[in-house]
Structure formats: C-alpha cells, structure tokens
Amino acid sequence: MGFFDKKFCDVCGEKIGLLGNRKLEDGNLCKNCAKKLSPFFSERRASTVEEIKQQLAYREENKRQLAFFNPNHIIGTDKRVYIDENSHKFIVTSSSSWRECNPDIIDISQVTSCNIDVKENKEEIKRTDAQGNKVRYNPPRYKCEYVFNVIINVNSPWFSTIKFELTSFDRRPDSRYTDLFRDYERQADELKRALVPSLYGNSYYNNTNYNQNQQSQYNAQQRYQQQQSYSNEQNNMNYQPTMPQSRMWVCQHCGSQITGKFCESCGSLQPQSMTNAYNGRAISYRCDKCGWTPSDPNNVPKFCPQCGDVFDENDIS
C-alpha cells in the first residue's frame, strides 16, 4: 500500500484525510475518533484497535455519568479540580463548559498519590555599564518566579498520571514570602487533603460542616498569622512559639482559635490523637522548614506559627 493510498478508520470506518491518520499498533484511527480519547491518555501508538474501541465505549459512558456529577468544591485557577464531595469523585479541566468537553470522572479511591512540585525559575539581573556592556551586580541580583506543578497518580486502565500547573501562567509568585505564594501553598495542601484523605485521617470528608469558602479560610489564616506577627514584635523578635493554653486549640481547616469542642467558624470537631498506621506509635510533628514542634500533638495547627509553612505529611517525625 502506497503513501497516498486511501485509508479508512478501523474504528468508525470513515475515510481518513491526507493528514488525518493517527497510527495504532495494528491499524489506523481518524482524527475525529482520536479527539474522543481521554486527554490524559498517551499510549495511542502502542494500543490496538480493540483497546481503542474499549476506551471510546468507556468515554461514552463517562459522558452519560457527567449528568449525575455535581461538584460542590473547586480548587485551582486556570486548570481546575472540580470535586463532588457527596460521591467522592472529581474531574480536572480548564474548560468552564466542562460537561461539553467530557472530562474523565475519577473516584477518590483511584488516587494513589498527589504530589506538589514547586519549581523555582531564577534569572540573573544585569546592568549596563558606561561602555554599554552587560555586567553583574555585586552582590548578584535575581528575578525569580515559582511554579506549582501538581502530579496526581491514579489507578486507571486508560492512564496513570495527571499533571497540570496549579499556578496561573501570568500570576506566578516572585517570592516565597508573599501572600500569593502562601495562597498557592494553601490550595496545594487543600488539594492533597481532598484527593488523599487517608493521609490526614479522612478529616476532609468526615467533617460534614466543612466551610467550602476558600477565601474565608485564607482570611482566617491571615488573621492568625498577623496575631503571631504582632506577638513577635511585642517580644522584640524573641518570640518562642507555644501552643494555646490548656483548653485552646487551633482549627486545622480554617485557622480559628477555639476553646470548645467544635470550631465556631466552620464546625470542625476537635481532632483526637492520631496513630501511625505503619508502626502503631503516636504521630508527632516537627516543621520541616524551621524545626518548630507543637507541644500538644493533638492540636497541630494547619500552618506553622513560626514560619507560616503548611503542616502536612512532610512534617511527620
């Protein structure tokens, strides 16, 4: 068969145009059928015609199931994660008309890990001297930007990894010490708690009164950090972080300081002692950025009061 011979799609039977052929392991696929495949699928050339037919059948069923998908929580800006907390399912898409683009519905139980890779892009700034040459500053100066990349590994017959940028391309933080950087840290932490709840005692889904308003949580945390900053100034920057008094605890969801059994801001139940599922010992925390350790392991704040870093599995000691 020559290069210019007519080819037909082995899935739908339609004639394939000159530049419309998508090769399979044992046949040909037209571009219209290829568009219907999962956007996270990358093994087309190694797939057989029968495997492609099975995936397209799955995609049609996925499209029907979207009618019953009702997200009540959204994380992200350009590329967003829509979570249906009632069914414990989610989708990842950049389209606001997501029902039309047929994003894959993924069950939370399919997620094997969710990692955040913070990449620093650094470019040295130079000046022009009297002779018109570009020379370095002394000490050197740099322009930085930080990119938050999400890597979700899933157990699916059609794809195993979902990768996307959490930060907006035109709104990346230029410093680790800005509110914007901390906001992306908060979103990243929230995403991990939602997609891998077993690492956090399933608190994300056990809390039926969880406050879904992201901005309210962020503002509450900012108030808490401001209180800590004021305390630092009052003690001539010699503040030694301590946990709240005997009956005071910090809500891990919204950052409020609470004295009762339930959070007055979001309704979260005061956390009980956690047990390490791997060796049976009680979990203790130590901030991996500054070394601060909470005196009460049952009342671990969501953010370190010394440096503002998010408390997550990296801080378990």
Image (tube, rainbow, N blue to C red):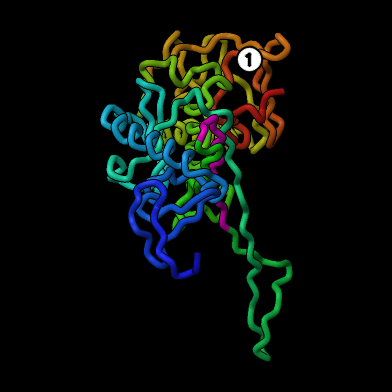
Tell me if residue 66 comes above or below residue 134 in the rendering. above
- Give the percent coordinates (x, y) of residue 180: 48, 47
Q: Main secondary structure of the magenta part?
A: strand
Is residue 224 shown left or right of residue 176? left
**Residue 155 can be seen in this image:** yes
Name the foreground residue: 34 vs 279: 34
Going by the picture, which residue comes out furthest to the bottom?
131
Q: Which residue is mark 1?
A: 296
Tell me if residue 15 comes above or below residue 295 in the rendering. below
Q: Residue at x 34, y 41 (%)?
A: 102
**Residue 214 can be seen in this image:** no
Is-magenta flag for residue 32? no
- Give the percent coordinates (x, y) of residue 23: 50, 55
Q: Residue at x 66, y 30 (%)?
A: 314
Q: Residue at x 59, y 37 (%)?
A: 115
> SS at mark 1?
loop
Tell me if residue 258 comes above or below residue 56 in the rendering. above
The crowding category of the residue bearing disc 1, from other C-alpha atoms within 10 Å (few below 14, some 14 to 19, many at least 20), is some
- Quadrant, the C terminus: top right
Q: Amino acid at mark 1?
A: Asp
Going by the picture, which residue comes out furthest to the front?
1
The magenta segment is 145-157
